[in-house]
Image (cartoon, grey):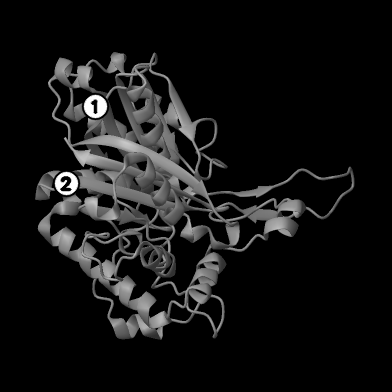
Amino acid sequence: MHSAFLVDATRTPFGRHGGALSSVRADDLAALPIAALMARHSRLDWAALDEVILGCANQSGEDNRNVARMASLLSGLPVSVPAVTVNRLCASGLEAIGQAARAIASGEAELIIAGGVESMSRAPYVMAKAQGALARDQKLEDTTLGWRLINPRMQKCYGVDSMTQTAENLAREHGIARTDQDAYAWRSQQRAEHARQQGWLAEEITAAGTTSGKQVVTVAADEQPRPDSSREQLAALKPLLGADTSITAGNASGLNDGAAAVLLASEHAVRKYGLEPLARITGMASAGVEPRVMGIGPVPAIHKLLSRTGLGLPDFDRIEINEAFAAQVLACTRALGLPDDAAQLNANGGAIALGHPLGASGTRLAMTAAFALRRHGQRRALISLCVGVGQGLALAMERA
């Protein structure tokens, strides 16, 4: 088996739903970090790129018809470079990296760009075809997030709880209090703000240009963070599912727009092109769980990965678990034996503060971890996400 190295990474800022990036098509958005990597590595023979693999969860609108291929062409990559889009919902961007690493490890590829994209602002409404010639029961389905065009058998066998309901299920079954969720969300905001002040977020971001009316606007920072949110303000927010529930807009991730990409290379390609790797990918594992508690998915995925690698949780200096909901992260950390405020967990904040453009989040987590390993001289990082319809994905890396 060959080593697969994460050489470089960048992302767009993450925009709010309906915010500064909402006018940018998903294929154009995905092209931006690819083009940025090309510009950074202008001496690399881009015709030698074996593949572009991008994750995308929706694929119902302008991100249809293989958004990875469209973004590759729009970025200026040679037409001879192939591309494929993968979908593991919220973990799609990490799945793309894992698939790329496996291709390199098997010797079937030398250079791959992997990443992900999601424009949740531009997610369309869809309508199924009529069941009969004169049928009048069609309805529009919002593709922004969650179930649509539901299979009745799926609903009967497993239920079709909303993402918010799955987090509420975990909160109730694991006894996670609203105060603990809000405390976690507040820490995410504070850690993200600290990372911004240190310039660590800027290291990840390539500014995106967009238009506002007749003006060209440059977006250089994430729009989602609310560093001034106080614990009192978080506590005052109304629960999303009723008075006796605990999930709020403050302790959940947002609906966001963004794209991210990383360059992966074999050891041979690293030497040939004089590249300086950030990290080496050492494994990936996935696992399934009940859809109604999809947020617990990282736990079995992490256990499976640790079993394969022979490592334990204490062997990792950094752990990134996607913050779909504070209740979901806390259910995972408590099951893994980590304290709620573990310093090594989401040390730069997470999706509650930074945003969660579904297809891009996994890539963002991986680049955050890779940059941090280099910055702090740390050795290993573990990245994991929960996945709608009941899955978890985990990936391990070590500093190169």
Q: Is residue 282 above or below residue 107?
A: below
Which residue does the image show at 73% across and 46% down from the upper left?
128
Q: Position of residue 268 (x, y in %)?
A: 21, 17
Q: Where is residue 383 in the image (x, y as percent from the top left)?
A: 33, 49
Residue 321 vs residue 266: left or right?
Answer: right
Residue bearing the label numbered 2: 373
Q: In this view, does 165 lie above or below 91?
A: below
Number of residues whose C-alpha sits closer than 10 Å to that of mark 1, classed few (under 14), some (14–19) or many (20 or more): some
Q: Distance between the residues labelled 2 and 1?
A: 23 Å
Which residue does the image show at 26% across and 44% down from the upper left?
367
Which circle, 2 or 1, is nearer the viewer? 2
Q: Position of residue 88 (x, y in %)?
A: 50, 43
Residue 221: tell me if it is visible: no
Residue 55 vs residue 131: left or right?
Answer: left
Task: Check the picture and name the quadrant holding the N terminus.
Answer: top left
As shown in the figure, which amino acid type bears the numbered disc 2?
Leu
Residue 348 vs residue 146: left or right?
Answer: left
Q: Is residue 361 above or below residue 172?
A: above
Q: What element carries label 2?
A: helix
Residue 163 vs residue 4: left or right?
Answer: right
Q: Which mark is residue 133?
A: none
Number of residues whose C-alpha sits closer than 10 Å to that of mark 2, classed few (under 14), some (14–19) or many (20 or more): many
Of the two numbered discs 2 and 1 on the same chain, state the one appearing first in sequence. 1
Q: Residue 329 occupies which quadrant of the picture?
A: bottom left
As shown in the figure, which amino acid type bears the numbered disc 1?
Met
Q: Nearer the viewer, residue 133 or 72?
A: 72
Q: Is residue 275 above or below residue 167?
A: above
Residue bearing the label numbered 1: 38
Q: Where is residue 192 in the image (x, y as percent from the top left)?
A: 23, 62
Residue 77: tell me if it is visible: yes
